[in-house]
Amino acid sequence: MKLGLNNIPHHWIEEIVNLAGERIVVVNREGVILYINSAYCEFLGTSVDLAIGRPVEDVIENSRMHIVAKTGQKELAALHPINGSEMIANRYPLIIDGELVGAVGTVMFRNPEEWRLYQSKIQHLVEEIKYYKTKAEKIQKSKYYFKDLIGKSASFSAVKSLAERISGSQSAVLILGDSGTGKELFASAIHNNSTRASFPYVPINCASIPEHLLESELFGYDDGAFTGAKKGGKKGQFQIANRGTIFLDEIGDMPLAMQSKLLRVLQEREILPVGGQKSIAVDVRIIAATHRDLEKMVEEGKFRQDLYYRLNVIKIEIPPLRERQGDIELISMKLLEKLERKFYRKGIKLSDEVLERLNQHKWQGNVRELENVLERSINVLDGNTIEIAHLPLYLRDQETVSLPKKESDSVGKASVNAAMPVQSLKETLAHVEKQAILNALSATMGNKQEAAKLLEIGKTSFYEKCKLYDIQ
Ligand SMILES: Nc1ncnc2c1ncn2[C@@H]1O[C@H](COP(=O)(O)OP(=O)(O)O)[C@@H](O)[C@H]1O
Ligand SMILES: [Mg+2]
């Protein structure tokens, strides 16, 4: 085979150059046009015949090609005004056999507007890819089995075996539990242990989908349902989940109007796409979950009672971590194994003191908070043993305000806390107040609004106190 362009028939070359350069011009050292393609001429309002052989500055307004052909200095992505619009031009010196013989110019976009359009199209694609990537990762990650649910405490084991037993049933399941207790894990495990396991498992977070999209996301839409609707319509998640399971997470955050529509699906076992005429039958098992108190919401008129009854056929209540005797240690060990793999470490242990501290903590963020604490500790760990000093500040600072363990300790005398120094009452209260705020923040992963709610104080007062105690 010959090298370079020699294999390409000579009459192909022009077309190849056209395709590669879109708009392209070639000048000699004197700045006379040797070649210009028709796309460029069209934009300039001239023709190839008229342009060839003329000085470039006569043909192209504001051209600098003749300058580049002399200086040999390339100019990339230069803004080039022509006909009142700006183009983005690249100008390269043409060097053949080490000698400057002229210059080649290309125009990438006719104007910055076109460039922005191009960029925004790419931006859209990048965002879409990101969305689908996290979604795919989530689906991948959301494949859990009962063996993945760690915990041997009596209260947890009871819930776990109940969930295992009801996996095979076709009835709706309502999973209740504080944030971070493992509701998503249970939903996935129930699906994977059911007769529907080989069909889709579709998790939907009702709180994270914008309200105006929820209906079309769940039920899909028909062709031309609204402006911007995709041609041919779009399948809803209920249809996608057909014969499988749909997991409606954060069901307590579903708007009332949607609750009525969901109720209809549960009763009729069919969905009506947005803008659609015909209902579509679906066979889907529903697992719903929330950290909210649905019964209270029903009383307050924020959650439909009839929907609540429909969902609450099988109720799974996951106990908070602090009520799961012994599970904190067990889960910590499992999590450490996982983290060791993630950080390429081995043999990481917890000191006895740390274990005691973990067992005393309230864990308002439950297993998710425990995961965070351990990961943060490993990040600052130098040796192999996690000590108190490696814990996040709010856990480190915690005074052991423990109540007397055995009743006999306190018989006949007031309990004394040796760990607590004797200070003025004001200082002591301030200390406790600061601790309460830090605990609430840790439980909500730093979300101040949620933390204020936990403490049952107003947002403003919460922010004031943060400022007072220098809490970020
Ligand atoms: N019993 C458990 N065993 C192991 N990991 C758990 C357990 N419960 C929760 N987790 C972990 O805690 C985190 C929070 O669980 P998730 O199911 O998202 O909680 P929820 O949906 O109740 O807020 C997840 O990373 C999960 O892997
Ligand atoms: Mg969740």
Image: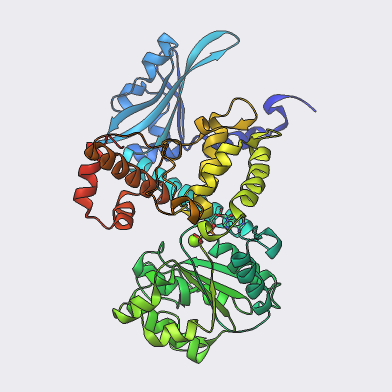
Question: Quick check: 50 above or below 214?
Answer: above
- Between 43 and 246, the residue placed more toward the observer is 246
Q: Where is residue 283 in the image (x, y as percent from the top left)?
A: 59, 84
Left or right, 10 with reference to 358: right
Q: Give the residue at x 29% y 53%.
A: 452
Q: Quadrant of the N terminus?
A: top right
Q: Quadrant of the C terminus?
A: top left
> What colouring method underlies this structural image?
rainbow
Left or right, 185 with reference to 111: right
- Between 263 and 416, the residue placed more toward the observer is 416
Q: Give the residue at x 32% y 22%.
A: 57
- Between 80 and 428, the residue placed more toward the observer is 428
Q: Give the residue at x 31% y 77%.
A: 302
Q: Give the residue at x 63% y 26%.
A: 383
Res. 216 in view? yes
Tally the numbered discs. Answer: 0
Question: Quick check: 450 above or below 235?
Answer: above
Taking the view exactly as shown, the residue that stands out farthest to the bottom is 268
Q: Position of residue 312 (x, y in %)?
A: 49, 82
Question: Quick check: 207 above or below 33?
Answer: below
Question: Quick check: 312 above or below 159?
Answer: below
Quadrant in the picture for residue 342: top right
Res. 181 in view? no
Taking the view exactly as shown, the residue that stands out farthest to the right is 1
Q: Position of residue 118 (x, y in %)?
A: 41, 45
Quadrant in the picture for residue 426: top left
Quarter, ligand 1: bottom right
Q: Position of residue 56 (x, y in %)?
A: 36, 23
Quadrant in the picture for residue 49: top left
- Between 405 and 342, the residue placed more toward the observer is 405
Left or right, 21 with reference to 164: left
Taking the view exactly as shown, the residue that stands out farthest to the front is 412
